[in-house]
Image (tube, grey):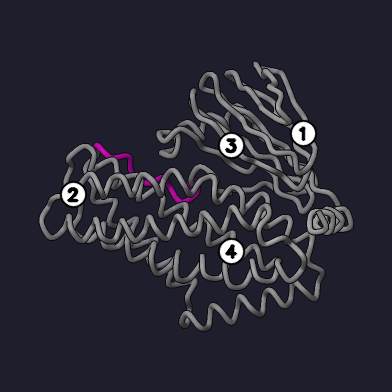
Amino acid sequence: MAPTDVLENEHALIERAMQVVAAAAQSLSADEPLPAELLPEIVGFMQGCVKDYHQAKEDLVLFELLEQKGVPEHGCPLAPLQNEHQKIRAVLAELTAAVAAYQASNLGKERVVESLTTLIETYPQHLWIENFLLFPMTNKLLNADEQAVLKQRLDRADAAHGPNAHQEMIRRVEELESAVAKLTPLTTPPVAAHERGGPQRMPEIMRGTVIEFSLTAEAERLRQEPAWEHGRNAKTLIKFPDLRVVLTAIRAGQRLTDHRNPGRIYVQTLSGHLRVEALGKEFDLPVGRVVAIDREVPHHIAALDDSTFIVIVAWPGRHATEEAVVSEKRS
């Protein structure tokens, strides 16, 4: 297991927590009662397990090691991710204050819902960038010795956070899911364990010498999951060191902005209608149309109708990745 796989596994736990956050926001918006412990447990998980544990490991271990390797501190992808970490910290501070006020006086529900909604809107793209850009780049960039250093530093960070830190994160996610199970039927319940995930999660990744699946069936499952209610849901269908295949369902009017991949990508519309913007041009993608984009080219994807599309990401070898980083640093 690569050291980044540990961080990616923690992403899966965060995505499960986002399902709970979405359910809590939905219930509050509908004036449905919440279990007394749910909002404090959400705050505790996000502050302790996400900000102080997971996010701190990325900021103080992974990002620092990548900077030492030559990845520009003020360039992509580190600068945007660090900015989002700061935004998340600010949102969590606001959520903490809003929940305290709401519990003390039963006022300020709108502040709580707004903070929960911001988390729901922020995390899918943030985790997508880390899962599909930052972590693959890290694995291509670091040699075996450097991977070992990364693992040692992550292990030390875990030990400093307390014994069985990852198991504690799992336990607290399960507590959140138990609390949200008490909500009234009006609120969409958490999905089953084998279907868990959020807009950018990676359950049931298919590996093997020969892989077979139904795109139609997988797309229908995405539209049945709670995350679809928030405008977008995606699933990694295939994961290899140099190749990933991602299926996305997206509602009309939604946009995926400021994407930039270290590998070349292929985008094909399976249903609906998309528009892709790259290099100042717009590419119309009705059903059956495709566009291929070279690595490191910023692009945006907009859904003109409710749509499903597939993205194939192919990464260059280690040598090409290192050349790209060195070139960016010199420029």
Q: Position of residue 71 (x, y in %)?
A: 73, 61
Q: Position of residue 127 (x, y in %)?
A: 55, 51
> Residue flagged by tag 2: what amino acid is it?
Gly
Q: Using the numbered discs, state the Cα–Cα distance from disc 1 to disc 3 in whole angstroms.
A: 15 Å
Q: Is residue 192 magenta?
A: yes
Q: Position of residue 246 (x, y in %)?
A: 65, 39
> Residue flagged by tag 3: what amino acid is it?
Thr
Q: Earlier in the sequence, mark 1 or mark 3?
A: 3
Characterize the local packing of mark 4: few (<14), some (14-19) or many (20 or more) Cα atoms within 10 angstroms. Answer: many
Q: Nearer the viewer, residue 191 or 290?
A: 290
23 in relation to 35, above or below: above
Residue with the mark numbered 3: 257
Q: Secondary structure at mark 4?
A: helix
Q: Main secondary structure of the magenta part?
A: loop
Q: Earlier in the sequence, mark 1 or mark 4?
A: 4
Q: Earlier in the sequence, mark 2 or mark 1?
A: 2
Residue 130 is drawn in which quadrant? bottom right
Q: Using the numbered discs, state the Cα–Cα distance from disc 2 to disc 3 in whole angstroms.
A: 32 Å
Q: Residue farthest to the front? A: 331
**Disc 4 vs disc 2: which is toward the camera?**
2
Q: Are marks 4 and 2 in contact (CB under 8 Å)?
A: no
Tell me, yes or no, if residue 203 can be seen here: no
Residue with the mark numbered 2: 108
Q: Earlier in the sequence, mark 2 or mark 3?
A: 2
Q: Using the numbered discs, state the Cα–Cα distance from disc 1 to disc 4 in whole angstroms.
A: 28 Å
Q: Which residues are magenta?
A: 186-197
Q: Earlier in the sequence, mark 4 or mark 3?
A: 4
Residue with the mark numbered 4: 7
Q: Secondary structure at mark 2?
A: loop
